[in-house]
Image (cartoon, rainbow, N blue to C red):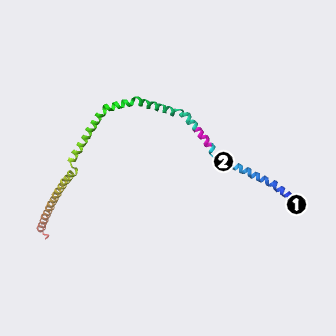
Amino acid sequence: MLADVNNMAAAASGMGSRPVQRIQDEVLHVNEVFSRLFDHRPFLRGEIEFFKKEFEEKRGDREVEQLFRSLELITEIKEGQIEKIVNSSDDNLPRTIADVQVALHMCEDTLDTESKFNCEELLAKKRAERSARLTAVQQDVQEKLRLLQDSYQEKEQSLRAQFQQLEKSAGYI
């Protein structure tokens, strides 16, 4: 009986190692598929290297050249242009200041002239004039309306009197 148990254990262990190995192979295969589908690091690394290479080749030493050009311009300005600017400003600055002061005085004169014409008073005066004209026009219209109504009533009374006289002469009354 012990031999049967050992045989069964040997058979189970031999049989058991095969399914375990198969499961391990499947797990490795699944991990490899997962890695290929969802791990983008190798692809991204290659794309980044390609972009970096293209960028460096296209740009070259352009930045360094621009820095040297900037340094040359700064040195040139420092050595020669500053003195020219100082001399030019010494020559032209007093005239420019005088022109600015004249313009400032002109602006002040314009503001003083404007303050003489007080807009609020002028607007109030114009409003009063318009209001007076409106009142006069309204009174004129009322007077004409009253005259028209009086004329209408007189005409109506004269027509009534005429029709009554015609009715009397015709014998209806």
Predominant secondary structure in magenta?
Answer: helix
10 to 100, vertically: above or below: below
Element type where label 1 sits in the image: helix
Using residue 20 as the reference point, say whether residue 43 is left or right of it: left
Work out which quarter of the rendered image holds the N terminus and state it.
bottom right
Using residue 98 as the reference point, say whether residue 1 is left or right of it: right
Res. 35 mark: 2
Using residue 137 as the reference point, say whether residue 14 is left or right of it: right
Residue type for callout 2: Ser
63 to 111, vertically: above or below: above
Q: Residues within 10 Å of mark 1 (few under 14, many from 20)?
A: few
Residue type for callout 1: Leu
Element type where label 2 sits in the image: helix
Specify whether residue 47 is painted magenta.
yes
In this view, the residue in front, 47 or 60, is 60
In the rendered image, the residue lying farthest to the bottom is: 173
Q: Which residues, given as a range, are shown in magenta?
A: 43-51
Question: At x 37% / y 30%, what residue is drawn?
Answer: 83
Write down the residue under mark 1: 2
Q: Position of residue 88 (x, y in %)?
A: 33, 30
In this view, the residue in front, 170 or 14, is 14
Q: Position of residue 158 (x, y in %)?
A: 12, 64
Using residue 76 as the reference point, say whether residue 19 is left or right of it: right
Res. 40 mark: none
Residue mark closest to the camera, 1 vs 2: 1
Specify whether residue 71 is painted magenta.
no
Question: At x 44% / y 30%, what residue is drawn?
Answer: 75
